[in-house]
Image (cartoon, rainbow, N blue to C red):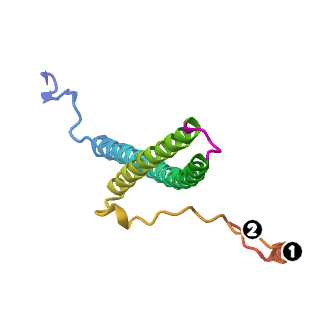
């Protein structure tokens, strides 16, 4: 605008958009921090799922091994019972029907042993696959040892020296 009396001109302007955006890098940083937090949570969730799968596979393998050992013991028992019943049948003490029943139980025990050994082998393969082990026979699966409890002397020693412990 021009003021004719004083022969001066002046400007009047308004800025629609700021020239510098100081908040944009701050927002980008906050967004990246949020994405990093989400990625950490996703990783933690995946690790937890993997740990749960490995734990379930390990416990399943322990159960399968235990059921296989039980099936072996039952087969041995059925085998001995069938041998005793066979001797009794030959002596005429036992009827043929009872002898066939004990022989049938022995065959059933053998079938159960085959099924449990296949189940154990399958679970061993699954665990090896989860742990990226090439040979499933390398897995040294054993029951975890129970925790060792404090003896009476250790407990008394810890109670006597409780003031000397450090804060956590």
Q: Indicate the position of residue 165 as horizontal and vertical percent values.
A: 76, 74
Residue 121 magenta:
no
Q: Which of the two residues, 89 or 119, is positioned nearer the viewer here?
A: 89
With 35 as the anchor, is 115 left or right in this view?
right
Label disc, if present, on residue 156 of the rendered structure: 1
Task: Please state the horizontal and vertical placement of residue 145, each as a whole percent of the image.
Answer: 61, 65
Q: Residue at x 77, y 71 (%)?
A: 150
Task: Say whether residue 95 is magenta.
Answer: yes
Question: Could you tell me which residue is drawn at 43 percent across and 44 percent down?
Answer: 111
Residue under label 2: 149
Instruction: Determine if residue 48 is in view.
Output: no
**Residue at 20% over, 26% down:** 12
Does the rendering let one see residue 75? Answer: yes
Mark 2 or mark 1: name the one nearer the start of the chain: 2
Q: Residue at horizontal 35%, vertical 57%?
A: 128
- Badge 1 density bin: few <14, some 14–19, many ≥20, Cα 10 Å: few
Q: Is residue 32 above or below residue 163?
A: above
Tell me if mark 2 has few (under 14), some (14-19) or many (20+) residues whose alpha carbon lies within 10 angstroms of its own: few
Task: Give the main secondary structure, helix, strand or loop, of the magenta stretch.
Answer: loop
Q: What is the quadrant of the C terminus in the image?
A: bottom right
Compared across the picture, whether 16 is left or right of 56 comes to left
Magenta part of the protein: which range? 92-96
* Position of residue 12 in the picture relative to residue 44 (left or right): left
Marks 2 and 1, how far apart at CA: 13 Å
Q: Can you give x and y, in whole percent of width and height, for residue 41 in the image? A: 42, 45
- Quadrant in which the N terminus appears: top left
Q: Secondary structure at mark 1?
A: helix
């Amino acid at each position: 605008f021009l003021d004719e009396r004083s022969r001066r001109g002046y400007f009047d302007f308004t800025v629609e958009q700021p020239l510098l955006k100081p908040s944009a890098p701050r927002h980008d940083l906050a967004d990246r921090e949020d994405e990093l937090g989400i990625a950490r949570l996703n990783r933690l969730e995946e690790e937890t799922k993997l740990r749960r799968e490995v734990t379930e596979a390990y416990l399943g393998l322990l159960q399968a091994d235990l059921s296989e050992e039980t099936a072996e013991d039952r087969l041995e028992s059925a085998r001995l019972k069938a041998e005793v019943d066979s001797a009794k049948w030959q002596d005429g003490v036992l009827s043929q029907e009872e002898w066939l029943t004990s022989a049938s139980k022995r065959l059933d025990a053998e079938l159960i042993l085959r099924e449990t050994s296949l189940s154990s082998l399958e679970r061993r393969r699954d665990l090896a696959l989860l742990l990226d082990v090439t040979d499933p026979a390398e897995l040294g699966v054993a029951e975890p040892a129970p925790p060792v409890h404090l003896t009476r002397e250790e407990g008394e020693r810890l109670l006597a020296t409780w003031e000397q412990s450090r804060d956590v």
